[in-house]
């Protein structure tokens, strides 16, 4: 049994959001650079150039990459041999988020859905917590903007629609989104489970290093095929036309019910922000 | 390469713009997004005075980050425009001739742009830090309680934009993807 103060969790959440909102990962930068070499559209190239310059400037000036610093999504894998001490871990996470959004001059984008009154400190966070073996805590901060979140879709397909139906639903989601989710996008997909688990897998897939294929060869092949089909839509950077509509497709799957075939597509803009730390 | 445009806008100048033109915009523009549009249209419905005269102005669909000490503004890229489609024709009918945002617009907005001789400009979504370097000053002029969604008067210099929808039927969100679809 390892004792761990929740203050460590709070400080780690704080540091992860401070970094994630301002410093794009090498994975995304690499894909932007790579697609700049192959993009055929002059507008597409100009947009990609601006995005690379923006990402460089944001890191240098410690400014948010995008003014939409998102809802604070957190994946936390808590080792079952960890004993959390010194307070409420849920409150510690919220405090970490609150401090980061204040100190980083990040936007307070969170409000009551019906009254639209802003909470003014970007809380509550969206926390996905799992108990796992071991005595470590793994935290991933993934600030999620809503230009892309709004373009996400849940398809409750029937088994008869099969793999082709799944692929078509994914491509159709990207087509319908057009330029709205700030392409080039990363397409997160969850197949199977229940309605809510499918979407959670789609969200989790976005925390994978961008462009790394799935460990499952069948999913890896689907990801490759779907990326090609999506880039043939012609939507291009910012929807102005071009070959770079998506940087990557990430798929996760799990068993589902005999009557069902849930497909969740969680759209992610080019500011695919995710930072992980292990305590 | 890029055409230089000054705001407040002149209708005669906008007439020459076509979807696909690159533009550098300087002058005064106003931020406004979801909540501010709702309030502007409520004021119009009640026959009340608006916080600024819409005639010949451009509204930038944006909700910036707080400014760091010494900076005029924080990151300040465009938000997705379709959410303002329900309100935009009403504002266009009162003289608004420029809209700056990202993403496709509704038929009703396209028609309002055509009817009023306006232009819809695309700014680069997700380039908030870069765009902030074009903003020279920012001042909240209305709805301060809305926080980031308040209306701000921005002075901008060489803000890089692309004409996305013009008053002559040109629409880059349709023409662009059609060119590269396979």
Image (cartoon, rainbow, N blue to C red):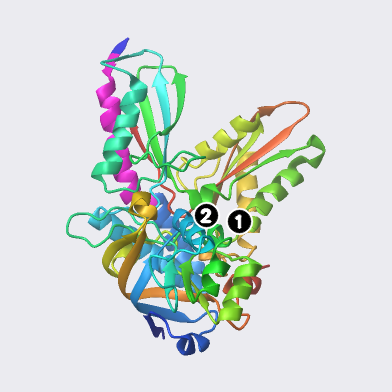
Q: Give the residue furthest to the front.
A: B47
Q: Nearer the viewer, residue A225 or A267?
A: A267
Q: Is residue A131 left or right of residue A21?
A: right
Residue A52 on the magenta span: no
Callout 2 crowding tier (Cα within 10 Å): few <14, some 14–19, many ≥20 = many
Q: Which mark is residue A185?
A: 2
Q: Nearer the viewer, residue A120 or B49?
A: B49
Residue A161 found in image quarter: top right
> Is residue B28 positioned above or below A253 on the image?
below
> Is residue B175 positioned above or below B78 on the image?
below
> Is residue A112 positioned above or below A246 on the image?
above
Element at label 1 = helix
Residue B5 in view in this figure: yes
**In which quadrant of the rendered image does the N terminus of chain A lie?**
top left
| Residue that mark 1 sits on | A177
Q: Please state the horizontal and vertical placement of residue A93, each as a whole percent of the image.
A: 34, 28
Q: How many marks?
A: 2
Q: Give the residue furthest to the top.
A: A1
Q: Give the residue furthest to the left.
A: B70
Residue A51 found in image quarter: bottom left
Q: Which mark is residue A3?
A: none
Callout 1 crowding tier (Cα within 10 Å): few <14, some 14–19, many ≥20 = many
Q: Which chain letter goes with mark 2?
A: A
Q: Which residues are magenta?
A: A3-26
Asked if labels 2 and 1 share a chain, the reply is: yes
Element at label 2 = strand
Q: Residue at x 67, y 27 (%)?
A: A255
Say if mark 2 contacts mark 1, CB within 8 Å.
Answer: yes
Residue A188 found in image quarter: top right
Q: Please state the horizontal and vertical placement of residue A208, each as a whole percent of the image.
A: 47, 41
Among the two numbered marks 2 and 1 on one chain, the one whose residue lies closer to the N terminus: 1
Q: Please state the horizontal and vertical placement of residue A43, each as a whole percent of the image.
A: 49, 73
């Amino acid at each position: 049994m390892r004792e761990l103060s929740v203050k460590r969790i709070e400080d780690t959440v704080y540091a992860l959001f401070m970094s994630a909102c301002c410093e794009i990962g090498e994975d995304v930068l690499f894909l932007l650079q790579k697609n700049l070499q192959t993009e055929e559209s002059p507008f597409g190239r100009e947009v990609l150039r601006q995005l690379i310059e923006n990402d460089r400037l944001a890191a240098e000036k410690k400014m948010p990459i995008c003014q939409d610093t998102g809802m604070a999504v957190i994946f936390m894998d808590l080792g079952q041999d960890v004993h959390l001490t010194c307070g409420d871990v849920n409150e510690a996470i919220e405090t970490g988020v609150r401090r980061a959004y204040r100190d980083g001059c990040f936007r307070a984008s969170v409000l009551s859905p019906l009254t639209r009154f802003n909470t003014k400190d970007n809380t509550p966070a969206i926390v996905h917590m799992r108990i796992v073996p071991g005595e470590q805590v793994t935290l991933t901060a993934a600030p999620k903007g809503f230009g892309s979140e709004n373009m996400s879709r849940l398809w409750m397909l029937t088994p008869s629609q099969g793999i082709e139906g799944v692929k078509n639903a994914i491509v159709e989601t990207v087509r319908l989104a057009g330029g709205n989710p700030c392409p080039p996008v990363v397409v997160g997909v969850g197949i199977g489970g229940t309605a809510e688990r499918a979407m959670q897998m789609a969200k989790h897939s976005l925390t994978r290093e961008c462009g790394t294929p799935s460990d499952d060869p069948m999913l890896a092949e689907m990801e490759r095929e779907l990326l090609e089909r999506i880039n043939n839509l012609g939507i291009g950077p910012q929807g102005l036309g071009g070959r770079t509509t998506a940087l990557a497709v990430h798929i996760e799957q799990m068993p589902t019910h005999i009557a069902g075939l849930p497909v969740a597509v969680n759209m992610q803009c080019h500011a695919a922000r995710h930072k992980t730390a292990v305590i | 390469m890029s055409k230089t445009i000054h705001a407040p806008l002149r209708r005669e100048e906008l007439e020459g713009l076509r979807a696909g033109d690159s533009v550098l915009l300087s002058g005064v523009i106003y931020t406004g997004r979801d909540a501010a549009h709702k309030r502007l249209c409520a004021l119009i419905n009640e026959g009340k005075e608006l916080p600024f005269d819409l005639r010949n102005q451009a509204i930038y669909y944006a909700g910036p980050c707080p400014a760091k000490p010494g900076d005029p503004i924080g990151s300040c890229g465009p938000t997705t425009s379709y959410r303002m489609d329900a309100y935009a024709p009403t504002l266009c009918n009162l003289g608004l001739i420029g809209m700056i945002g990202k993403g496709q617009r509704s038929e009703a907005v396209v028609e309002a742009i055509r009817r009023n001789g306006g232009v819809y400009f695309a700014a680069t979504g997700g380039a908030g830090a870069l765009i902030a370097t074009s903003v020279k000053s920012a001042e909240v002029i209305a709805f301060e309680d809305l926080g980031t969604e308040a209306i701000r008067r921005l002075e901008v210099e060489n803000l890089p934009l692309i004409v996305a929808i013009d008053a002559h039927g040109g629409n880059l969100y349709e023409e662009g993807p059609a060119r590269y679809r396979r």
